[in-house]
């Protein structure tokens, strides 16, 4: 498929929606999903800020092992779209959100908290700022051994000020810890705190 071709999307490709975009599976590439901004006034602006942040991460070659990568813009039958790595389990299913996992009767939160803590530390080590981390922005990817890896699909970057790579490392680190622990306190009963 050439870069200029229009990607045909419809409801059969729909994965999930957030407040600012609808996420669709790419029709011919299972490893990609396409986010189409909603009509929310802030949606386009948010996407542009996210893209700018990914550009910085790519430029300094940050290890994106716990973050869904961004591949570029495309035209779709539903308007401008943004292609990302689609997070799937070993069996091909789109991985479930942390929010859905917690709703599950078989959920084992005690097993997930250390993994989330590791994710928080990874953000600090790589100085990846988070602006909007919540349980629908983290997917739990399952491999064939049943092991789980939490992956962030949305909410990185600094949507409120100059992005992290322009601020001092010390300030960036304290910001990441503060925001991560706010998320941990609010949604995980402090069970994935980092210091
Ligand atoms: N890379 C991905 N792979 C698989 N599913 C994804 C991916 N990105 C997003 N999703 C699904 O689509 C939903 C909405 O996507 P996203 O969080 O990017 O939208 P948003 O409108 O920016 O969300 P928010 O309400 O957090 O601002 C996610 O909660 C998740 O279920
Ligand atoms: Mg989201």
Image (cartoon, rainbow, N blue to C red):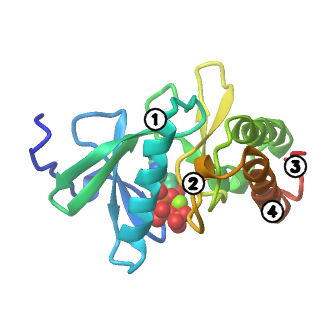
- Seen at 76% across and 56% down, the residue is 175
Q: Position of residue 34 (x, y in %)?
A: 32, 50
Residue 88 visible here: no
- Seen at 57% across and 54% down, the residue is 157
| Pointer 2 or 3: first along the chain | 2
Badge 4 vs badge 1, beta-carbon distance below 8 Å: no
- Comparing 180 with 15, the one in front is 180
Task: State which mark lies toward you, 2 or 3.
Answer: 2
Q: Indicate which disc residue 163 carries.
A: none
Q: Secondary structure at mark 3?
A: loop
- Mark 4 neighbour class, 10 Å CA radius: few under 14, some 14 to 19, many 20 or more: some
Q: How far is mark 2 from mark 4, CA to CA?
A: 16 Å
Q: Is mark 4 within 8 Å of ligand 1?
A: no
Q: Secondary structure at mark 1?
A: helix
Q: Indicate which disc residue 157 carries.
A: 2
Q: How far is mark 2 from mark 3, CA to CA?
A: 20 Å
Q: Which residue is mark 3?
A: 193
Q: Position of residue 142 (x, y in %)?
A: 60, 30
- Seen at 15% across and 51% down, the residue is 8
- Comparing 183 with 106, the one in front is 183
| Pointer 4 or 3: first along the chain | 4
Q: How far is mark 4 from mark 3, CA to CA?
A: 9 Å
Q: Which residue is mark 4?
A: 182
| Pointer 3 or 1: first along the chain | 1
Left or right, 24 with respect to 133, comes to: left
Q: Which residue is mark 1?
A: 59
- Comparing 193 with 11, the one in front is 193
Task: State which mark lies toward you, 4 or 1.
Answer: 1
Q: How far is mark 3 from mark 1, CA to CA?
A: 30 Å
| Pointer 4 or 1: first along the chain | 1
Q: Is mark 2 within 8 Å of ligand 1?
A: no
- Mark 3 neighbour class, 10 Å CA radius: few under 14, some 14 to 19, many 20 or more: many
């Amino acid at each position: 498929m050439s870069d200029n071709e229009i990607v045909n999307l419809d409801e059969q490709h729909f994965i999930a929606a957030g407040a600012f975009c609808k996420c669709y599976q790419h029709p011919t590439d299972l490893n990609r999903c396409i986010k189409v901004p909603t009509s929310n006034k802030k949606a386009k602006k948010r996407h542009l800020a996210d893209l700018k942040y990914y550009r910085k991460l790519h430029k300094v070659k940050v290890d994106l092992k716990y973050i869904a990568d961004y591949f570029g813009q495309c035209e779709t039958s539903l308007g401008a779209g943004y292609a990302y790595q689609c997070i799937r389990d070993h069996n091909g299913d789109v991985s479930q959100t942390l929010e859905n996992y917690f709703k599950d009767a078989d959920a084992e939160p005690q097993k997930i908290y250390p993994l989330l803590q590791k994710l928080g530390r990874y953000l600090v080590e790589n100085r990846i700022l988070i602006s909007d981390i919540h349980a629908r922005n983290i997917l739990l990817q399952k491999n064939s051994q049943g092991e789980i890896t939490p992956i962030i699909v949305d909410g990185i970057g600094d949507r409120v000020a100059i992005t992290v790579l322009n601020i001092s490392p010390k300030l960036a680190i304290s910001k990441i810890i503060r925001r991560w622990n706010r998320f941990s306190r609010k949604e995980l009963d402090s069970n994935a705190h980092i210091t």
